[in-house]
Amino acid sequence: MDILIAILSRVAKAAVTLLAIAVLNFFLLHAAPGDPAVVLAGEAGAADEQMIAQLRERFGLDQPFYLQLGKYVWGIVQFDLGYSFRQGMPVSQLIAERLPATLLLTMTAFFISLGLGIWLGVAASARVGKASDSLLTTLALLFYATPLYWAALMAVLVFSVWLGWLPAFGFETVGADYTGMARILDIGRHLVLPAMTLGLFFMAVYMRMTRASMLEVSQLDFVKTAKAKGLGGAAIRRRHILRNAILPVVTLAGLQAGQLVGGAVLTETVFAWPGIGRLMFESLAARDYNTILGVFIVSAAMVILFNVITDIVYRIVDPRIGARA
Amino acid sequence: MWKRFSSNIGAMVGVVLLLAVIVIAVIAPMLYPGGPWQMVQRPFLPPFAQDAYPFGTDTLGRNVAAQLAYGAQVSLLVGLVSTLVALLIGVPLGALAGFYGGMVDEGAMRFTEFFQTIPNFALAIVLVAIFQPNLTSIILAIAIVSWPPVARLVRAEVMSVRKREFVDAATLAGLSKPRILVTQVLPNTVSPIIVMASLMVATAILLESSLSFLGLGDPNAMSWGYMIGAARTVIRSAWWLSFFPGVAIIITVLALNLIGEGLNDALNPHLSRKGRA
């Protein structure tokens, strides 16, 4: 019962945050350069006074500010994110078409970075002070300083242009019309470079965190007990230390989900990956503010949803969290 | 403290690298008085082909070495100023929340959490796009997305310091609350703030370069991210145009991270033990 109340209150808090972001979005939209009615009339090719006035009335721009705000937020609640005049379709439809590609990319990158990061962090912590630990730590420091989009470009240069192993851009081979398994493999081949480069930076973050956390936990008394029981080093690391050390890493990973979405804008731009990040980049060049802000609010919603899920999973996995909150 | 810092090899490497970048940024106008936009040679001159142009020329025949030097100015300026602005927002907010507690704390922390929830790179893109790309909007956007961790850190530090005995002594001595906060509590939170700030400069430089890469840089300032963004489409024929600016970013960011870690070890010696065992 307690857990149900906790989950409900968490969801309610998330909803309030999302509403606040919608309000912020409204103000940003109004701060965007150009009177929307004038811009719309310009797009339609007839910017005379009468048309502008008509447009104002039609889109409610002549109404008082608070009514406009209310209408906007109510629209967002119903997934109405406005209309993209550049692309000639509703923003919500544009985003819905592109969202699956972004989800595929970010989720793959998330699991690659978390899995590899934890694995390498454990490996480094087991070899503290040895050459292999120094090598891993130095590499992590280097990845941590590397701009994501640059790593992506260099990966294209090496693995596509020079070696010719993997496709340089796109979601699948255009015109190949693969079906079934062949199509999945084709998409998979296109996914390797974007997912690896997006995951690389985060892998470095999780590796450093895992290593530090492992070393911290290994100083605790229960580890001595395990040693006294005669358990081997590997068993202690896996079953006793890692289980405790992994919690802060997963917490951090949940918090970093937002960065992953931001990183997707850069990765999708380099690899021409047809997701919402690429959509945002295209809209930047066209100064299509409705779409830019639509992508912004959808990515914020994704992050909030992700945080709620991590939170709930936690409460179930680790009962101590419920007691503290 | 200096002794501990200077015996840290990584930190000293960081200092040397950062000094080199600073020197290049400062003497850029003397080295290349023509500025970074001047066309000096045929386009697409490969690197190391002519001594005068060690990094080659770009698609318009501009000197890549000059662009790199001027790019250092923008990176350092944006990194430093945006961090200062972020501190100006985060330190007072965190200090008030931690010192006064109660409703003030509750309000300030909800506000901070809200900003932490928003994906920060996406928000920075939106802000710069709407307020038009220039150095001011870029610096403000980076500051707006970077202050929340500062507020949280300062709040936590202030909360622990304000319970110490010398604060009670100051209260007994009749000092007013605001005066205690500014003269007694805040000075004791400086070292973790310094550590965080040095790492924030590094992150800000990465953010600036990412914005410029997407075409949201100041059109009048040469920047490393812009160079990579402009060279993206010619990567097959002119790899050096994207390669060298990336190396410049890595060197600068790495240097700042190394310095930050060195400062952390030097200023909080008992904390750093944990990570090194």
Image: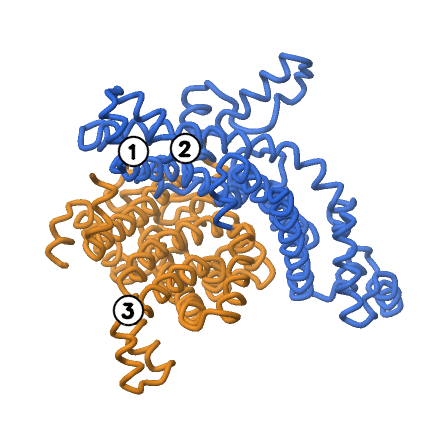
Chain colours: A blue, B orange
Label 3 neighbourhood size at 10 Å, few (<14), some (14-19), many (20+)?
A: few
Q: Chain of mark 2?
A: A
Identify which residue, A205 or A182, lies in the foreground: A205
Label 1 neighbourhood size at 10 Å, few (<14), some (14-19), many (20+)?
A: few
In this figure, which residue is indicated by the disc labeled 2? A154
**SS for tag 2?**
helix
Label 2 neighbourhood size at 10 Å, few (<14), some (14-19), many (20+)?
A: some
- Residue at 27% x, 31% y is A223
Q: Chain of mark 3?
A: B
| Type of amino acid at the residue the image marks with label 2 | Met
Give the foreground label among 3 and 2.
Answer: 3
**SS for tag 1?**
helix
| Label located before the other in sequence (1 or 2) | 2
Q: On the rendered image, what quadrant is the N terminus of chain B found in?
A: bottom left
> x and y percent of residue B38 in the render?
39, 55
Q: Chain of mark 1?
A: A
Q: Mark 1 and 3 residues: CB-CB less than 8 Å, in contact? A: no
Same chain assignment for discs 3 and 2: no
> x and y percent of residue A224 in the render?
24, 31
Q: CA distance from mark 1 to mark 3?
A: 32 Å
| Type of amino acid at the residue the image marks with label 1 | Phe
Q: On the rendered image, what quadrant is the C terminus of chain B found in?
A: top left
Query: Which label number is shown at residue A222?
Result: 1
**SS for tag 3?**
loop
> x and y percent of residue B177 in the render?
37, 81
- Residue at 65% x, 32% y is A100
> Can residue A138 be seen in this snapshot?
no
Query: Which label number is shown at residue A168?
Result: none
In this figure, which residue is indicated by the disc labeled 3? B164
Identify which residue, A324 or A103, lies in the foreground: A324
- Residue at 35% x, 49% y is B63
